[in-house]
Amino acid sequence: MKERWSIILIVLGIYFFIPSIILCKPINDSLIFNKVFSYKRNYTEPIKGEEYGIYLKYSFKTQRRNPTLFLIPTMYTIAKGERHYIGETYGKIVFNNIVNYEIKPQVAIGNISHYRKIMPVIFKYTIPQLYEMSLFNDKVLSPFNYNNRKFYKYIIDSISSQNTKILFEPRVNSTQLIKGFCHVNNSTGRIEYTSFTGEYDMIRFMTNIDMRTNNSYNLILPQYSNTKIYFKFLGNDIEASFDIFYDPQTNIFHSDSIKNTSNYILMNKVRPIPLTNTEDSIYNEYFNKKSNNDTIDYDKKQTQASKIKEVAWDIIGDHILNSMKAETDNAYLRLSPIFNPLYLSYGHSRGLSYKMRINGHYNFSYNKQISFNPYFGYNFKIKKIYLTAPLRYTFNRKKNRWIEFVFATGNRITDSRVLDIIKNENRDTIDFSTLKLDYFNDNILKLSTNTNINKHISVLFGCIYHYRNAVNKNNMADLNKPTSYRSFAPNISIQLNLNSKGPIITANYERCISKFLMSNMEYEKWEFDLSFKKKWQNLKRYTVRTGCGFYTNRSTSFFVDFSNFHENYLPNEDNDWTGQFQLLNSQWYNASKYYIRTNMSYESPLLFLTWLPWCGKYIENESIYISALQIEHTRPYFEVGYGITNRYFSLGIFGSLLNGGFYEIGYKFTFELFRNW
């Protein structure tokens, strides 16, 4: 038996570790490779606050479509409209840095309604950051970055007096890697031209970038790029094309020149390449149809009614699965879709949940803002609606000074008598379903204000008011027990951040004042928390969160309700499972006067399953989770888990240990399909 296990361990070692040793072997150490990897460091300056002119031409061509296209976010226009859309935009692109930029259009034309957006997610594939760790902002590892060299094979195809052609392809079949070639300048290592293909998040892309230019502007920006996008799903087949030209001129148009001139005429002045015959015919057909519609004499009432009806149906159809967003210079409003499976989540202990969110803010000035970001949801396991509605006024953004009012409802909790009930029980085997616990619904009002003392320390002052009423008031009344509890508690929180890339340490203190504002309980609570997130090279990330909390009071009746250790029935919008216990019974959160917890996770796009021939193409990320907990009257509780994320879903398998042995196994599942769309 021991020999059999030895053989299995040897095989696993060969499978997982030897490929890593091989991949860590350095590539050809010729001078040209060293120049490519060091070009950005040796020859370029960081982009910060720079502006360039930009011309963008795009087209969408529908090869095949069926009714399922209506179910895909941002595809409503293509699903019901024309089979071929084109458009052009000229303006300026403002770089805060190479991965953070904003495009400000000056002139735009096209046969897509101005309030429509088709597949905006694909635009990020049109401006790759060749020399960064990732090509598309934490997605797809760049073969031109030194830290990613172990994931690619490089072959020198040909050499001339001025440049060298290099072929590159991934060592494993992963959606985080690309395949292609590049022409490199022999003297500097600058990429003069590159072409590559890849596939990520349901999108297959093919990009050609021309970096050759005589203009005196930043040498890591291309002169021209073309990206073709291919999207196929459930029989639908869409092709898109993007052409981008960069120009150092940013002020070709002034307000006076634009005011009384058609966009089409203005675009003719700046278009760097002529339109194709197909594109010309699409424009002509669109403008002729628009002109005919303007001259037809419809009955005014009928026209108005039909327009209202059309707009109403468009709004309903377009926003069943899509977010509704409105934006001006000072205001922003975004509503979650009416129905979106991405907001569904299922967990072993929490059951099925659904959540919606509203985000809105208004800027009075650069330094002052008011925001309202409510979210609500429904948990099908306990048949309960949750609502949290924070209203915040920021009066000094530089100093992070704000005042916030929060209303929340839906939390279900048991009172402190649960501590007495289970005090003498064997907590390693206790079954809460057999206990007759008293449940209360919790309504919360919270007022707080925050300020930064300096760049490392911030202080929050506030107060919180709880009104808890019994779920089963009749039974409580029959037992001569109170049916409601009220508590008013001032609190203070101090946050310490010594380094922008270091851990964040938080200390909280809260004390309930008895008999103030009808408070009929008393408690004192302390909590300490440390959280740390670190991004490594190759899109790896690890997260650590550890902390403790305890009550110091002698009240005979109170509610164990920690801020950093509580049940969360609603799915996180960013799908981050770190810092949570996935299998812990919800009652344990209210069953101890203290807790000590640690949650750790490690994420990587290329971990275990990615190296398997048929899995790497579909796995975008892998994660390992380890959590530990110590509470009153029980031995340490542990959870370990492994999760994968692909274009369709995220799935995590978790196991728990208690009393030194296996306790439970479960899983968590969320949809990922079109999450970033």
Image: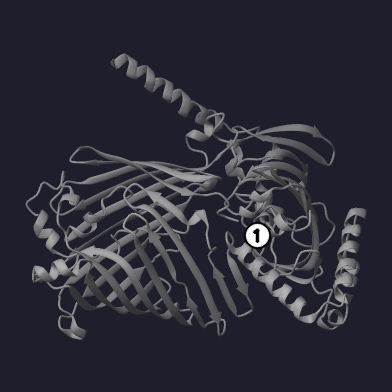
Work out whether 548 lies above or below 232.
Answer: below
234 and 316: which is toward the camera:
316
**Which residue is at the front of the view, 481 or 195?**
481
The residue positioned 19% from the left and 75% from the top of the image is: 485
Left-right relation of 555 to 7: left
x, y (%) of residue 197?
Answer: 71, 41
- Image coordinates of residue 163 in percent, x first then y, are 81, 41
Q: Answer with the quarter of the image where residue 656 lies.
A: top left
Report the number of discs: 1
Question: Seen in the image, is 355 located left or right of residue 102?
Answer: left
Helix, strand or loop status at disc 1? loop
Vertical relation: 662 (above or below) 65: above
- Quadrant in which the C terminus appears: bottom right
**Quick one: quadrant of the N terminus?**
top left
**Whether residue 246 is visible:** no
**Residue 583 can be seen, yes or no:** yes
Q: Quadrant of residue 415?
A: bottom left
Residue 350 place in picture, x, y as percent:
33, 52
Q: Which residue appears at 13% of the width and 73% of the height? A: 482
For disc 1, the marked residue is: 98
Which residue is found at the position 69% from the left and 63% from the top?
A: 117
> Label 1 amino acid?
Ile
User: Circle 1: is it few (<14), some (14-19), or many (20+) Cα within 10 Å?
Assistant: many
x, y (%) of residue 271? 88, 63
- Model colouring: one colour
